[in-house]
Amino acid sequence: MRYCAALVFALVSSLGCAGDPAPQPSGADAAVGPDATVLPFMAECPLGQNAACASDLCFDFNSKGPHCTHGCTVDTDCEAPSPGCSGMGVCKAPGGGGGTGSGSGSGSGSGG
């Protein structure tokens, strides 16, 4: 009888109470938990948090910081707003100076 009582106690203890809240994640897990918003393509993302991105890749671009991106081999693999595929095999982050602007080179000065 004692064996049965101990077995029933162990079984009930392992189930817990129906009203007990589920344990909440902390630290890095909390940022990408089940209630976290999954970030879209080219959104800024927390460095090192790949799971925060829908693409599961948060890449740290040197001059633009970490953004959600995905792998690519050619420019057409990358949808807007990315300008194309980088040499690192990921879609480039938009923005920044491309050096394609033009200027007239004419100006007036009054050297003196």
Image (spheres, rainbow, N blue to C red):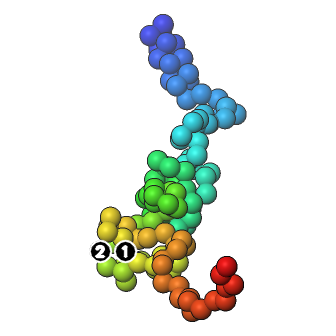
Q: Choose between 55 and 24: the one closer to the eye.
A: 55
Q: Which of 22 and 2 is in front in this view?
A: 22
Height in image: 85 above or below 53? below
Q: First in sequence, mark 1 or 2: give its number.
A: 2
Question: Who's the residue at 41% across and 78% down the image?
Answer: 84
Query: How far across and down, in percent of the image, does residue 7 sit?
Result: 47, 17
Extreme residue in the front direction:
112
Determine the secondary structure under disc 2.
loop
Near-viewer residue (79 or 19)? 79
Which numbered disc covers residue 85?
A: 1
Q: Residues within 10 Å of mark 2 (few under 14, many from 20)?
A: some
Residue at horizontal 32 percent and vertical 64 percent from the top: 88
Residue 61 visible from this viewpoint: yes
From where the camera sits, is residue 71 visible? no
Q: On the rendered structure, is 1 left or right of 85? A: right
Q: Which residue is drawn at 54% across and 17% down?
A: 9
**Depth check, front residue: 96 or 102:** 102
Name the residue type under label 2. Answer: Thr
Q: Do the residues labelled 1 and 2 touch (CB within 8 Å)?
A: yes
Q: Label 1 amino acid?
A: Cys
Place of residue 44 in the rendered image (x, y in percent of width and height, measured from the top left): 57, 60
Marks 1 and 2, how far apart at CA:
7 Å
In the image: residue 111, left or right of residue 91: right
Q: Please give the name of the residue rendered at 54% of the width and 40% of the height, measured from the top-left corner.
A: 28
Residue on which the image places disc 2: 73
Quick one: quadrant of the C terminus? bottom right
